[in-house]
Image (cartoon, rainbow, N blue to C red):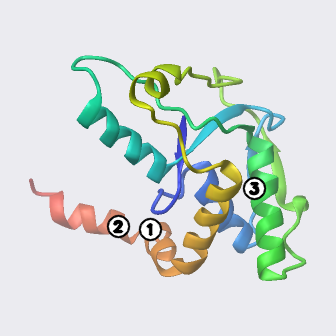
Amino acid sequence: SNNYGPYQFPEKLIPLMINNVKHHKQLPVYGDGMNVRDWLYVEDHCKAIDMVANGGRDGEVYNVGGHNERPNIFIVKTIIAQLHDRLQDDGIDEGLIKYVADRLGHDRRYGIDPTKIKNELGWYPETTFEVGIVKTIDWYLAHEEWMNNVTSGNYQKYYEEMYKNR
């Protein structure tokens, strides 16, 4: 499943789209936008990891799924609608979407079966996509300084200074 939520680096779909929408930048969408992914809110994923670490069988594999399969274009249009309404900005609309060539070998759908973690450990995600995306957008709107810092490129200078002679 694709994780999403606070502090996700803005190269990933959801934070990239939030940031681009806010700045009226184009929203690159691969192919026809119908690539499907399962979305898992990060706090639910952390709870699943904790449950596996504390109650799972040694050496066993547990698939953790969000039960929130959505096409990428749905994700992008949801972000546009949310930010248009919240920011009251008529410059935020679906005209920002730009369909781009799909990556070679890009899977049309990622799907997993998380039945075992539910049956053996009782884990099931608490956060629906509709709730998680609102929480995620709220976080990014409240943490503009963080987003500006990680998109400025200054962190690359930091790593160069810290590690160039090691």
Residue 133 shown left or right of residue 32 in the figure:
left
User: Whole-percent x and y of residue 127?
Assistant: 59, 51
Q: Which mark is residue 150?
A: 1
Classify 10 Å Cα crowding around label 3: few (below 14), some (14-19), many (20 and above): many
Q: SS for tag 2?
A: helix
Residue behind mark 2: 155
Q: Which mark is residue 27?
A: 3
Q: SS for tag 1?
A: helix
User: Whole-percent x and y of residue 82?
Assistant: 78, 67
User: Gap between marks 1 and 2, in whole Å?
Assistant: 7 Å
Mark earlier in primary sequence (1, 3): 3
Are circles 1 and 2 on residues that touch, CB within 8 Å? yes
Q: Amino acid at mark 3?
A: Leu
Mark earlier in primary sequence (1, 2): 1
Q: Amino acid at mark 2?
A: Tyr
The residue at 65%/49% (across/down) is 128
Vertically, is 76 above or below 124? below
Q: How many marks?
A: 3
Q: Amino acid at mark 1?
A: Val
Instruction: Give the residue furthest to the left.
Output: 166
Mark earlier in primary sequence (2, 3): 3
User: Whole-percent x and y of residue 54?
Assistant: 24, 36
Q: Nearer the viewer, residue 53 or 28?
A: 53
The residue at 44%/43% (across/down) is 45
User: Whole-percent x and y of residue 27?
Assistant: 75, 56
Quarter-of-image position of residue 55: top left
Residue 49 shown left or right of residue 110 in the figure:
left
Q: Nearer the viewer, residue 29 or 53?
A: 53
Vertically, is 57 above or below 5? above
